Image (cartoon, rainbow, N blue to C red):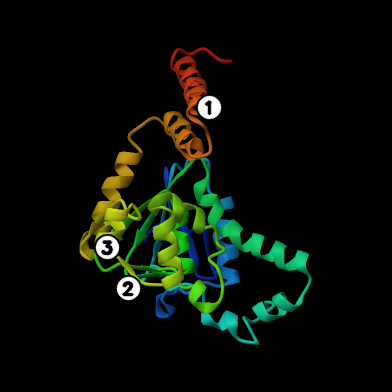
Amino acid sequence: MATLVPLLDKDGVRLTVDDAIATVTLTNPDRRNAQSPALWRALTEAGRSLPGSVRVVVVRGEGKSFSAGLDRQAFTPEGFDGEPSFIDLARGDDDVLDSTIAEYQDAFTWLRRSDILSVAVVQGHAIGAGFQLALSCDLRVVADDVQFSMRETSLGLVPDLTGTHPLVSLVGYARALEICVTGRYVHADEAVAGGLANVAVPADALDAATSDLVGALLAAPRDAVIETKALLQGASGRTLDKQRIAEREAQGRRLRDLAGISD
């Protein structure tokens, strides 16, 4: 991937595409890939820049950490150059505050699109916004040194970058509450056992494990994968009878497609 010409390379985010596989890389290892509003805008731009050929998006961070979360500069009165500080936002109009947070969330939500599968490749620290970025992906491959932690509540805040819904879905309400309120680390063994990670491997095997998973994800026909992902994403919000209907409708579309019959 390193030899590919990036489609985007700015504000700590690089996007490269190799046919059906896109790789989004956080590129500030000296700061453990700390996040900022500029980085979030670049992530959103990466999502909008994906060619139609992309089926799998791999999200990873350079260096020893996936992402150590929000850059602490956000909490200073000065904030980031050219950006309103969080203090300024808090003192401002409610609608502006709400729309600004919604804009930040856009950086995370596109990874759940039904037409792609997203895989987070996580090593070292994945804290706060870093944890939520990993949770935004459909699947997670982790190194055995991974340390997930949701620190927002400990700082007097809440996790607001779309991480609470997948966290509860993966580990249940009680465990999610305990993880968020205590801010403790979740290590590799617990992450796999609790459903936060699909597989944990030694750090030097992370690339190989990711390649194997991506290859398996690409083996099935794209339209069948899209329909299956949509069925599973919506399952928790449907009754059994409604899920049965959704399955029938999806299977009908697949059978007609395979038979060459258009609607």
| Residue in the picture at 43% in, 17% down | 258
First reached walking from the N terminus: tag 1 or tag 2: 2
Q: Quadrant of residue 74?
A: bottom right
Query: What whole-number distance in Å separates the C-alpha atoms at marks 1 and 2?
Result: 45 Å
User: Residue 116: image x %, image y %?
Assistant: 47, 42
User: Any mark on residue 64, and which?
Assistant: 2
Q: Residue at x 45, y 54 (%)?
A: 168
Mark nearer the viewer, 3 or 1:
1
Residue flagged by tag 3: what amino acid is it? Answer: Ala
Q: What SS does tag 2 mark? A: loop
Residue 9 appears at what percent x and percent y?
Answer: 51, 65
Which residue, given by chain and number where applicable, does mark 3 sit on?
Answer: 188
- Image coordinates of residue 198 in percent, x first then y, are 30, 51
Q: CA distance from mark 3 to mark 1?
A: 36 Å
Q: Secondary structure at mark 3?
A: helix
Residue type at tag 1: Lys
Q: Quadrant of residue 46?
A: bottom right
Three-letter amino acid code of the residue under disc 2: Lys
Q: Is residue 158 left or right of residue 27?
A: right
Image quadrant assignment for residue 178: bottom left
> Which disc number belongs to residue 242?
1
Q: Is residue 236 left or right of residue 1?
A: right
Are the two marked residues, 3 and 1, in contact with CB atoms closer than 8 angstroms? Answer: no
At horizontal 58% and vertical 15% (from top left) the residue drawn is: 263
Q: Quadrant of the N terminus?
A: bottom left
Classify mark 2: residues with Cα within 10 Å, few (<14), some (14-19) or many (20+).
some
For residue 16, say whether it is visible.
Answer: no
